[in-house]
Image (cartoon, rainbow, N blue to C red):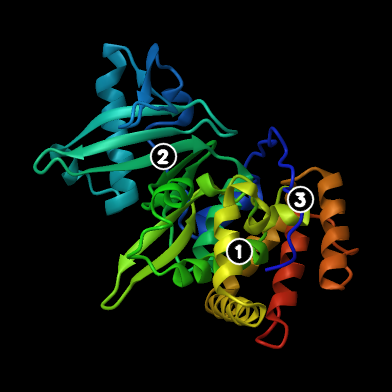
């Protein structure tokens, strides 16, 4: 982790970029494109809404969408089909014992997603999935998460609509407030995971990892609890021009985790964890080289950030790495250059 700096400034309203023909071609090749029975625009036709409160009576910034009786039955059937596409490859036999309990609309943020709650009639076990506008930045972010991170993620695109599975875990801000001081949790393990998550985010240029944009996945082990931090918001993939926006350590929302790292981990061990994470990412690159090459090629030819942000990031990364980024003309160029710098002597570079 690098020296502390002032909290970086996030662009107030991110520009939405449509999925390009080349990215659509990539998605078809790697089975990420499917025809969907319900589009994002269909869900926008709700007639009324009710505020959704959490168990403590606090406004969640989500509203429950209410649709006309004539539309509800067909809409719910289509949403169950989408769930089967995500979970069972389109097998519709599961529909008979599922029902849609609620469709929520988010009034906060850039993408204004819909969240669908689906319930199993036999045991009342429920699940969520999301329907969003197919923003190219987010699609690149999801695919890079799938290829480069320790976790796999399931999503599909149809023209201007994106569906995503729910990523389970405790939201980072909730974890920091309610669980960080839990005496049963080893704080050194939490600090270690934040160092590794910080490195993962920076290497693949995933921005805006404030505490409410990731979750803690907690797994009991035979001796101690294990922690993994998982990003849940990918809208700021390779979008901002400031280097520090890709380092979670610089956000004030993560200050408690930064303090934990300073308390429990010295600089030498931090460098060790960073090196371990870069090695793991390099191994994932080797295992998915052809697919990653195809994704980066589409990304290099795409516009997913304003030109001034591309120029700014080139300048800041040139200074950080002491390597010239002047030849980079797009965020895809920059990301490929960053990955090649990371790979270094570990493995074969991405051409």
Q: Secondary structure at mark 3?
A: loop
**Where is residue 259 drawn, in percent x and y?**
59, 61
Number of the label disc, if any, that sits on residue 130: 2
Identify residue for label 1.
198
First reached walking from the N terminus: tag 1 or tag 3: 3
- The quadrant of the rendering that contains the N terminus is bottom right
Badge 2: few (under 14), some or many (20 or more) residues near its Cα, within 10 Å?
A: many
Q: CA distance from mark 1 to mark 2?
A: 26 Å
Badge 1: few (under 14), some or many (20 or more) residues near its Cα, within 10 Å?
A: many
Q: Secondary structure at mark 1?
A: helix
Residue 351 visible to the viewer: no
Marks 2 and 3 close (CB-CB < 8 Å)? no
Is 97 left, or right, of 199 in this rendering? left
**Where is residue 104 drawn, in percent x and y?**
38, 28
Please determine whether, in this image, residue 336 is positioned above or below residue 157. below
Report the front residue among 32 and 246: 246
First reached walking from the N terminus: tag 2 or tag 3: 3
Report the front residue among 84 and 61: 61
Q: Secondary structure at mark 2?
A: strand
Identify residue for label 3.
6
Quarter residue 297 falls in? bottom right
Number of the label disc, if any, that sits on residue 61: none
């Amino acid at each position: 982790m690098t020296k502390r700096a002032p909290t970086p400034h996030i662009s107030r309203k991110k520009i939405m970029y449509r999925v390009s023909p080349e990215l659509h071609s990539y998605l078809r090749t790697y089975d990420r494109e499917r025809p969907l029975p319900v589009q994002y625009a269909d869900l926008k036709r709700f007639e009324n809404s009710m505020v959704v409160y959490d168990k403590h009576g606090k406004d969640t910034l989500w509203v429950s969408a209410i649709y006309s009786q004539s539309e509800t039955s067909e809409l719910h059937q289509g949403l169950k089909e989408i769930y089967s596409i995500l979970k069972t490859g389109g097998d519709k036999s599961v529909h008979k014992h599922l029902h849609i309990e609620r469709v929520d609309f988010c009034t906060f943020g850039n993408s204004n997603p819909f969240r669908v709650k689906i319930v199993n009639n036999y045991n009342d076990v429920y699940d969520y999935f999301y329907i969003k506008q197919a923003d190219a930045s987010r699609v690149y972010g999801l695919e890079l998460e799938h290829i480069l991170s320790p976790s796999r993620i399931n999503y599909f695109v149809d023209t201007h609509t994106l569906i995503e599975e729910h990523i389970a875990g405790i939201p980072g801000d909730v974890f920091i407030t309610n669980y960080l001081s839990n005496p049963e949790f080893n704080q050194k393990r939490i600090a270690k995971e934040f160092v590794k998550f910080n490195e993962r985010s920076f290497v693949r240029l995933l921005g805006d990892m404030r505490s409410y944009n990731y979750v803690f996945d907690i797994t009991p082990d035979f001796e101690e609890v294990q922690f993994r931090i998982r990003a849940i918001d990918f809208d700021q993939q390779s979008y901002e021009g400031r280097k520090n926006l890709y380092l979670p350590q610089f956000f004030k929302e993560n200050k408690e985790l930064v303090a934990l790292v300073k308390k429990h981990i010295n600089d030498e061990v931090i460098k060790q964890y960073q090196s371990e994470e870069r090695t793991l990412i390099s191994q994932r690159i080797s295992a998915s080289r052809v697919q990653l090459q195809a994704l980066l090629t589409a990304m290099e030819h795409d516009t997913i950030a304003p030109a001034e942000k591309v120029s700014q990031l080139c300048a800041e990364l040139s200074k950080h790495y002491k390597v010239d980024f002047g030849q980079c003309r797009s965020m895809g160029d920059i990301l490929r250059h960053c990955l090649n710098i990371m790979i270094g002597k570990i493995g074969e570079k991405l051409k």
